[in-house]
Structures are given as C-alpha cells and as structure tokens.
Amino acid sequence: MDTLISKEKLCRDMKKTFGSLDTADKRKMNTIIIAQPAIEHRKTGSWILGDDHMTCPVCGAKWKYTENETGLFDFCPACGMEATE
C-alpha cells in the first residue's frame, strides 16, 4: 500500500533541505513532485448493517457478509471509505 504524503509539505521540506541547489534543480524537483497523482483524503463512516449485507454510507454500495471472510470490511471496496467501527 502506498504511503500518503502532502505534496505541499514535501515541497516546503525539500526547499529547506536543499536550499543550496540551483534554480534549475529546484524546478526539476518541483516538477517531479507536482506530477505525482493526487489522492483524495479517504472518507470515514460506519457500515449500515442489513440482514445479510452491509451498505456503504458514502457511496451506497452493498456487500454480502459472505464476500469477506472476516465479516465486515475495514474499507469499502467501491469508494475506499474507511470503516470506523
């Protein structure tokens, strides 16, 4: 699993750390950072529990309990909602 980072914080930290680099190198580093894909902050919520299924409160996707060996999913496979309970 990828580790999520703040591109803005990374740019600030790199500017502090590599302040002695020339302008061309700084531009190259910023170009690389900015080109990285943005990842939306994961929404959180609690599954809406039905008789034989759970429903995601964020996207409405329904999953049967039998589709996950441990019962409830830790996250919604459809939208990435992180289950808080």
Image: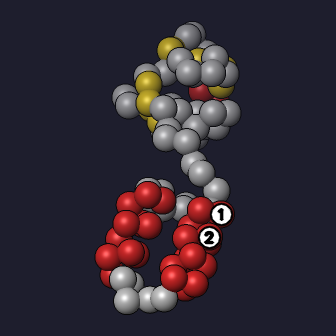
Q: Nearer the viewer, residue 71 or 29?
A: 29
Left or right: 43 in relation to 85: right
Coordinates of residue 69 in the picture (x, y in percent)? 58, 40
- Return the residue found at the far left: 16
- Report the mark closest to the observer, 1 or 2: 2
Location of residue 33 with respect to 62 vertically, above or below: below
Quadrant of the image for the N terminus?
A: bottom right
The residue shown at (40%, 75%) is 14
Total marks placed: 2
Q: Residue furthest top?
A: 51
In the rendered image, which residue does mark 2 sit on? 31
Residue 5 place in picture, x, y as percent: 45, 59
| Observer able to see residue 58 | yes
Image location of residue 73, percent across then percent down:
53, 35
- In this view, the residue in front, 73 or 10, is 10
State the residue at coordinates (38%, 84%).
18
Amino acid on which the number 1 mark rests in the picture: Ala
- The numbered dot on residue 19 is none
Label 2 secondary element: helix
Q: Which residue is mark 1?
A: 35
Q: Quadrant of residue 60?
A: top right
> In this rendering, would 34 be left or right of 84?
right
Q: Relative to 36, is 49 above or below? A: above
Q: Position of residue 13 (x, y in %)?
A: 35, 71
